[in-house]
Image (tube, rainbow, N blue to C red):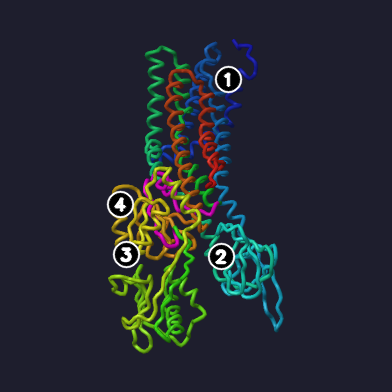
Amino acid sequence: MVLPWEPLHNPLVQLALSIPVYAMGLWFFGKSAYHSLKSGVPNMDVLIFMGAASAFFYSVFGTLYYWNTHEVHMYLFYETGATIISLVLMGNLLEKRSVKKTTTAITSLSALQVKTATLLLEHDGHVHTKEVEVSQLKKGDTLQINTGDSIPIDSKVVFGEAECDESLLSGESLPVHKVIGSTVIGGTLVLTGNMKVEVTTNLKDTVLSQIIELVKKAQGTKPSIQKLGDQVSAIFVPVVVGISVLTFLISYFFLDLGSAQSMLRAVAVLVISCPCAMGLATPTAIMVGIGKAAKRGILIKGGDVLENFAKSKKIIFDKTGTLTTGMFSFSTFWFKEGEEQNSKAIIYALESHSSHPIAKALAKEFKTFENPALSFSKFDEVKGLGIKAIDSNGDEWALGSGKFMGLSEAKYDLYLNKNKEQYAAWNITDELKPDAKQLISYLKEQGVENVLLSGDATKKVKQMSEELGIEHYFAEQMPAQKLAYIEQEQKLNPLVMVGDGVNDAPALSKVSVGISFAKGSDIAIKSANLVLMHNDMKALQEAHIISKQTYKTIKQNLFWAFFYNVICIPLAAAGFMHPMLGALSMAFSDVIVIGNSLLLGLKKVKAD
């Protein structure tokens, strides 16, 4: 006897309508499930595939076995499996759109890259212009840059002058005046003026390209806190499958609920479980945190840097160029009689071979005394102390501290000696950065211990420590001594070090978080894993705030991921959650984690 069912109640109609959904869903989730099982790390799609497939084949069995009976409707779960597939696919779409938002930093930075440039070409004594793709430019090409243009590529000014907005890189809100010989950075904006510039680098090696690549790499790294989530995710799927099977057996054999209800509970356990939330908890927060930092001129070279910076309870500071402006002034000069001009020329010749901040300042101070006739060889620089060289007459010149000259008591900060005879001596002054005191105060409020580690004289280091409120200081430290101290302390606790000199590079590479400024030496920047494009201490405070906010967000995400599964899986096993509701919950649990990560981008960071 054929029952007078409505068409949609007919098992064959339901089967026909659900086949396209199942075909698409099981193919989509099946491929992902297969590859994850093949790699030995089963993912969420294994659970979705098993849940939907179980509902489908259970329904097919019921349709064939109980056809034309009143019991057939007890075995029909076509709509359950189809709804699960639809909801999870919708959740995946929302998830992908949400994850895409976490990469807005890279999108914003990439938008700064100029696509075309005005190339100047000379032919038969006449100069004409040609619009070309920036990717076609090569070193030595000459470009025309006008008011309102963005600099296409890193270059050097060869004609004209202009005011440029470099706030992207330097944090300096005021325009920077560019003249012949000045370096201009790709992506920065010409506010007023016109220039001809010569290309100095390839597109892939520009400052902006390197920043974008750095952010991409950093967003792909994992901090140690993610290890917990990864370990749990690795065993999560097998455990859930076991719970699902156990749920069916207990429901059917011990609770006598029948095969239909037992199947519903087992499927609900499969589809409500969400290992994805644990997998997304850390990387989404890391992407937002690193992107947020990049927009503020803070370049972080890995997710582990954010975690270590947030957790560290001790920060070591270098003095010169870090806590001070690095804008040195020189006073109380003494010169050997009749040797002032020659001494200044020799000071320039020696210091122009060093990248130490004081050496750079001296070379700049005495640039006008440059003497091309002076010739030196056999340069020997002792980091943190001074430099020696031999002139064309075979005389040995030495420039450095009293300690470098072998003096037991030094009246001046620096000396210039010829064959161990004093030729000149002078003192150095270096002002504190305006916001250094605020930074130290902030860090103390956060429970962070501050240490000043410097190669300067004890008197100067002690005075600065007292002025800033730094509890511990070590003066007259050679690079090897700095490194030994840091290696010892690093064994006890994760350390953060802030420095910008060549002599800081070994120490920066040894600590958990090495921080340098973009205006520091190249080797210090390469050794550091957090680079501040802004040459002030507010940027360092903001980096610490972002690190703590990101680490807190990661912990919130992981808590939600664990809490969700610990609560929902037992509810599903006990029959309090229908599989369709479970699928909806699972689909949106990922969105909640991603949404919480996106909120990180809205949190206040500004150092007040």
Q: How far apart are marks 3 and 2 (CA)?
A: 39 Å
Give the numbered dot on residue 489: 4
Residue located at (54% from left, 28% from top): 584
* Residue 380 appears in the figure: yes
Sooner in the amino-acid sequence: mark 4 or mark 3 = 3
Residue 195 or 582: which is nearer the viewer? 195
Amino acid type for the residue under numbered disc 3: Met
Residue located at (43% from left, 31% from top): 562
Does residue 272 appear left or right of residue 227 in this picture?
A: right
**How many labels were placed on the picture?**
4
Q: Position of residue 138 (x, y in %)?
A: 58, 71
Give the numbered dot on residue 478: 3
Position of 2 relative to 343 (above/below): above
Tell us which disc is closer to us: 1 or 2.
2
Label 1 with label 2: CB-CB less than 8 Å: no
Residue located at (53% from left, 46% from top): 608
Residue 313 on the magenta segment: yes
Position of 208 relative to 193 (above/below): above
Give the numbered dot on residue 152: none
